Image (cartoon, helix red, strand yellow):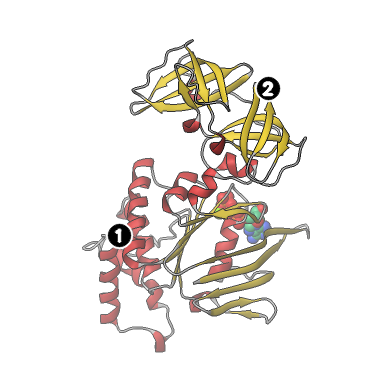
């Protein structure tokens, strides 16, 4: 179990200003679980991770690993990084190019104080053990620089694992890899996590990585956690515009709350009223955006009389065939929506259709920021 409570980290800039990189962050990760810190550049992900690793001294808060205090601001307690039961993989891998694979992996053991250091034979055994885990057995004597990107990545993982950490911290570990390799390594990480039942904190700004790997996602912005929950929950029930926009692709329909309750609100939009699920408590008259994912924009060629709410007449503006699916841009009066459907459902340009936006999959969130110019996604610009 890893517990982070009210973590604050302020940096002093050259000009004497204080930057609050981490602002009262609290979360816990049960043993064997993966928590992902997800958020845009500069939101405080790396600083949070480095604070847990002991590479930063926080300004406030408590960090505990396996029921032991690692940091406590109130008692001025700070356990140095080498005495924390963690392994860390950095975005840059931080592999030592002058060393062979064996030297890189053994390094964390070789630098231990003599009384804690295993014998040479034990070190050799440990190196063989972790290289097998990451499937690099036989590469011991290879120059580290003579490895491919994916192999260097696995080498960095092996080095992080050699001291059998309680917690593995991974800072954008896949960002230097090409798309194919990234997907492969994602499966590798899942396998490792299962086999070693590691507790992991994973940092990324890639939402698909976060959705694929995490038990829990914490979405960060400006040093704070704005929403935390299991991936499906965050995806289906974003609390605000930022989370809805950051996690996956969505349509935003602007509107105004007509009436509301805890479970359902009615929103007046330019094309009529939509029944929606409120992402957070909303008040009558409030300006909102209705977020509805493209795959939830259902398209029908005939009107289903059984559906009485959230049905709009529309027209197909563009259709792009992508193999398994088709991407559509449809217009309902002044409202433009993206939709994704099975490739078998072949609707053509200009065709009149009916849209159903299931109320349970429409989430109304406060309209906080101006929307980016509502343009067609680039993959829809191929055909007009
Ligand atoms: N050593 C430092 N001195 C001053 N400010 C810092 C320092 N390290 C980080 N910051 C600031 O703290 C904020 C958070 O930085 P951090 O590196 O944690 O962001 P991040 O979420 O990891 O971003 P990225 O996705 O770009 O890696 C940023 O505004 C950054 O400029
Ligand atoms: Mg970072």
Query: Which numbered tag is attached to residue 143?
Result: 1
Residue 112 in which image quadrant: bottom left
- Whether residue 42 sits left or right of residue 381 in the image: it is right
Local crowd at mark 2 within 10 Å, few (<14), some, or many (≥20)? some
Task: Give the residue at x 53% y 43%.
Answer: 236
Q: Give the label on residue 215, or none.
A: none
Give the camera-side residue of 203 and 162: 203
Q: Is residue 88 above or below residue 237?
A: below
Residue furthest top as drawn: 350
User: Marks 1/2: CA distance?
Assistant: 63 Å
Left or right placement of residue 314 versus residue 266 in this view: left
Residue drawn at (66%, 23%) of the image = 272
Tell whether circle 1 marks a residue whose Cβ is less than 8 angstroms from ligand 2: no
Give the structural element (helix, strand or loop) at label 2: loop
- Asked whether the residues under the numbered discs 1 and 2 touch, taking CB atoms below 8 Å apart as contact, a structural biologist would say no
Locate residue 296, reporting x and y percent. Answer: 49, 32
Whether residue 377 is visible, yes or no, is no
Secondary structure at badge 1 equals loop
In percent of width and height, residue 276 lies at: 61, 36
> Label 1 crowding class (10 Å Cα cut-off): few <14, some 14-19, many 20+?
some
Tell me which label, 1 or 2, sits earlier in the chain: 1
Query: Which residue is nearer to you in this view: 233 or 372?
Result: 233
Q: Which residue is mark 2?
A: 270
Q: Nearer the viewer, residue 76 or 153?
A: 76
At which x and y percent is residue 366? 70, 40
């Amino acid at each position: 179990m890893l517990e982070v409570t009210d973590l604050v980290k302020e940096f002093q800039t050259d000009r004497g200003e204080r930057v609050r990189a981490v602002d009262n962050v609290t979360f816990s990760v049960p043993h064997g679980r993966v928590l992902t810190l997800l958020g845009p550049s500069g939101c405080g992900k790396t600083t949070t991770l480095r604070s847990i690793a002991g590479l930063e001294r926080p300004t406030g808060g408590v960090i505990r690993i396996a029921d032991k205090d690692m940091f406590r601001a109130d008692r001025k307690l700070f356990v140095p990084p080498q005495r924390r039961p963690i392994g860390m993989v950095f975005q840059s891998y931080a592999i030592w190019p002058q060393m062979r694979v064996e030297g890189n992996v053994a390094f964390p053991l070789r630098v231990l104080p003599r009384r804690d250091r295993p014998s040479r034979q034990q070190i050799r055994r440990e190196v063989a053990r972790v290289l097998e885990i990451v499937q690099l057995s036989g590469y011991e004597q290879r120059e580290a620089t003579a490895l491919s990107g994916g192999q260097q990545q696995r080498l960095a993982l092996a080095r992080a694992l050699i001291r059998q950490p309680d917690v593995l911290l991974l800072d954008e570990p896949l960002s230097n890899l090409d798309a194919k390799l990234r997907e492969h390594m994602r499966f590798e990480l899942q396998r490792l996590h299962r086999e070693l039942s590691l507790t992991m904190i994973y940092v990324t700004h890639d939402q698909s990585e976060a959705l694929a790997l995490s038990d829990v996602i914490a979405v960060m912005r400006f040093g704070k956690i704005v929403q935390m929950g299991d991936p499906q929950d965050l995806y289906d029930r974003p609390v605000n515009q930022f989370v809805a926009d950051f996690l996956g692709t969505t349509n935003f329909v602007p509107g105004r709350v007509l009436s509301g309750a805890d479970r359902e609100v009615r929103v007046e939009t330019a094309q009529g009223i939509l029944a929606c699920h409120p992402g957070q408590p909303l008040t009558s008259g409030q300006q909102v955006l209705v977020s509805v994912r493209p795959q939830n924009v259902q398209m029908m060629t005939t009107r289903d009389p059984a559906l009485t709410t959230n049905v709009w007449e529309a027209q197909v503006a563009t259709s792009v065939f992508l193999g398994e699916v088709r991407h559509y841009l449809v217009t309902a009066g002044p409202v433009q929506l993206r939709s994704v459907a099975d490739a078998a459902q072949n609707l053509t340009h200009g065709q009149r259709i009916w849209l159903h936006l299931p109320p349970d999959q429409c989430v109304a969130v406060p309209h906080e920021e101006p929307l980016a110019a509502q343009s067609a996604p680039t993959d829809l610009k191929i055909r007009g």
